[in-house]
Image (cartoon, helix red, strand yellow):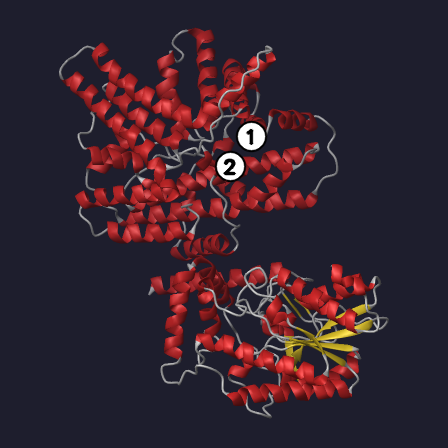
Amino acid sequence: MRFSLAVLLFLAVWETCARVDDSITDGAPLLGLHDSSVLLTTDEFGVTGKPDAHYLKWKMNSLGFRGGQLRWDRERVICIGASETFGVYEPEGLEYPRQLERELNSLAGTERYQVVNAGLPGQSLSSFARRAVATVGRIRPSIAVIYPSLAIYIDPPEEGFVRDPRPPAPKLQPRIAAKFFDLLSASVPELIQTGIQRLQIKWQTRHTIVLDRIPESNVERFRHDLSRLLDILETEGVRPLLVTHATRFGSTIRPEDRPVLTAWRTLHPGLQEDGFLDMENRLNGVIRAEAARRNLMLVDAASQLHGPADFVEFVHFTSGGANKLARAIAREILCTGQDCQRDLAGR
Amino acid sequence: MLFNSTRFLVFLAIVLAIYYPLSHKYQNRFLLAASLFFYANWNWRFLAPLLFTTTIDYWCASRIEDAIAAGHPVRMRKPWLTLSVVANLSLLGFFKYFNFFAASARNALAMAGIEVNPQVLHIVLPLGISFYTFQALSYTIDVYRGQLHATRSYPDFLLAVLYFPHLVAGPIQRANSLLPQVANPRHPDYEGIVSGLHLIVWGYFKKVWIADHLAPIVNNLFSQPHLDGFHVLMAAYGFAFQIYCDFSGYTDIARGIANLMGFEFMLNFRLPYFSADPKEFWGRWHISLSTWLRDYLYVPLGGNRRGPARTYVNLMIVMIVGGLWHGAAWTFVVWGLYHGLLVVLFRALGPRLENRVPYWIRVAVFFHLTCYGWLIFRATSLTQLRAMTGALFQPFGQIDQSLARGLILFIAPLIVVQAIQWLTKRMDFLSFRWAGLEARTICYAALLYLTLFRGAPPQSFIYFQF
């Protein structure tokens, strides 16, 4: 009995230490919630960024976007997307929208542009489309860069699905659990982690059918969502710039990248590993076709970015990868806009 | 495999899991295999010199033992001792000192106007060579002196030298202590295991939370081309505690692992920064090396039996050799020389100081003298040392409060704990046996949290380079 109490006391001390640690290092509340969900809230359109929230390196401005306050003396570019756009692994200020702003102003030779990061983790095209008119109305951008996250179309939510507008009830989560999990992840060799992930996938799919490739209906769903968003933006007078989705794997999967692909699959176990590249190819084809059909600016990131230099894991950028993307987008914007700078070819 | 790596922890867990159910005979064989694997994991090629010298020492000790048993005169066993000493020191000299002496000779000849270009070899220093060489030498010397019987079991001797917890950075265990533990059955009991775990936790805390956090601060300071007096002082303090926590942390881990398997290693550190004079300091710092130098160098040189002048010379020789043992660089020689001068000075003035100066003042003064010694030890060159010494005597610049706070954050807990140990004279204070289970649980939980979740990125152990 005494030993059991000692174990509970040990865990309680660890939890206390974790909370005090978070409070000292991140300014986190001792008793409240302290995870990435503090960055989010819900409004009538669904999940959105919470104004003035901050968690670790991520800080939201007064409108609930990551980055600085809006500057009305600049031409604004909005970046639409999910966690790749929001920025996960890059140090503060090196996520691609911030680098895009610096790149645009450097190429333009003046502080002309402000790039607004409207990305949010897990945000789909349809969820942004619901709030597109309101967002565009607030920000009044001239250009919208769309870098969609494609994995949501492996198992997209039903049409018309809208999240409960009430904010989620805060959960009392042990903070030490997340720290312990991070420690284990960093300590366990990749081979063992991949083995565990494969077992996990096997367990999750034991009663389900695993697809070789996503159904054509999902591709059509993506086309529909993209087209709808583009219609809204063009109606609001915003020029879209489409970006194909890039992954670490490029066009083929190298043997050394297999463990990373397995890790990606743990998030979407219902699709075979080779189905991921097929999905990327087909949905990127939709992006290219839509760009051609509407005569839109297009950056083919899928062919320009790949490998561990550009990606930390499967889809999220290194700061180098974010820089590459930012430069490619800046060149596309400035070479097809009215202020075309031909000497960009030399850079 | 660094002690503070996941690979080592997995290795240790596997070793313990297999070790406990085995009988004594198989325990020894298994530990030997595990130790060979541990060493080979770093570089399997350097198993050869290790096994070579260990085999020579075993064979020589056996010949010496036979000569003693046969009643042969001393001159008949001396060649075997000579062979052992020459083999060990030749290997150590080649791997550790060849380039140093070659470069020093070239520079000395150049000063005399003679230009030579000696061969410079790209030599990799075998891990732990300074430690296992001294350990093996102590064995043959003890057998020669008749203080120890040579073991007739080659595997036992091999295990005593190669046993992985102490192989790469000590403590330098004496054969008369370790060999019986190897030869006889070991029965790790509850107290031993608890004691071992306690040492391991404290060792990792000192290494991972204190030493490894101080390392980048200290490295940054020593990499600056120009420092003012304040920063030199911070560098000295920082390195004093970094090296103490790094080395004593390693030793605690080694002792703790040994305890888990039923072995008992000697204490290697005993609150060294609470020493009031050099004699006390060297009785508290790296005790296994200082006692080795006393027993195998100082005493054979004559010790203090040949008058004061010869005593001082012997002390200087011992301290310079001790400095050189740490590394092949002039800074280590100067460090040894510096401590030698301190030893001589305090020996000459000691009684007068004790009577006139309060103990705590002598402790504070000697601590700062030791810190200056660490500046010498850590300096990248004599030029840097000169500059740092000069800066200490200039007016201090602006106090860098954030630097001071950073150092205090990591050093203060250690100072508080050790001050309590010193005042209460209880080295076992840190075992928390005086506290109830609940209090001990809280203390260990906090220590483990800081070690596991707030530890610095892993740094190599400083003494691995020796």
Q: Which residue is mark 2?
A: B243
Residue B158 on image: x %, y % = 26, 35
Q: How many marks?
A: 2
Q: Quick check: B237 left or right of A105?
A: left
- In the image, residue A247 above or below residue B383: below
Identity, as a three-letter code, of the amino acid under mark 1:
Trp
- Distance between the alpha carbons at the discs numbered 2 and 1: 9 Å
Q: Which residue is mark 1?
A: B374
Identity, as a three-letter code, of the amino acid under mark 2:
Ile
- Of A142 and A283, which appears nearest the observer? A283
Q: Secondary structure at mark 2?
A: helix
Q: Secondary structure at mark 1?
A: helix
Q: Which residue is located at x 44 percent, y 38 percent?
A: B248
Q: Are marks 2 and 1 on the same chain?
A: yes
Q: Quick check: A82 left or right of A141?
A: left
Neighbourhood count class around disc 1 (C-alpha, 10 Å): few under 14, some 14–19, many 20 upward: many
Q: Quadrant for the N terminus of chain A, please.
A: bottom left
- Of A304 and B150, which appears nearest the observer? A304
Q: Are marks 2 and 1 in contact (CB under 8 Å)?
A: yes
- Point out the residue furthest to the right here: A73
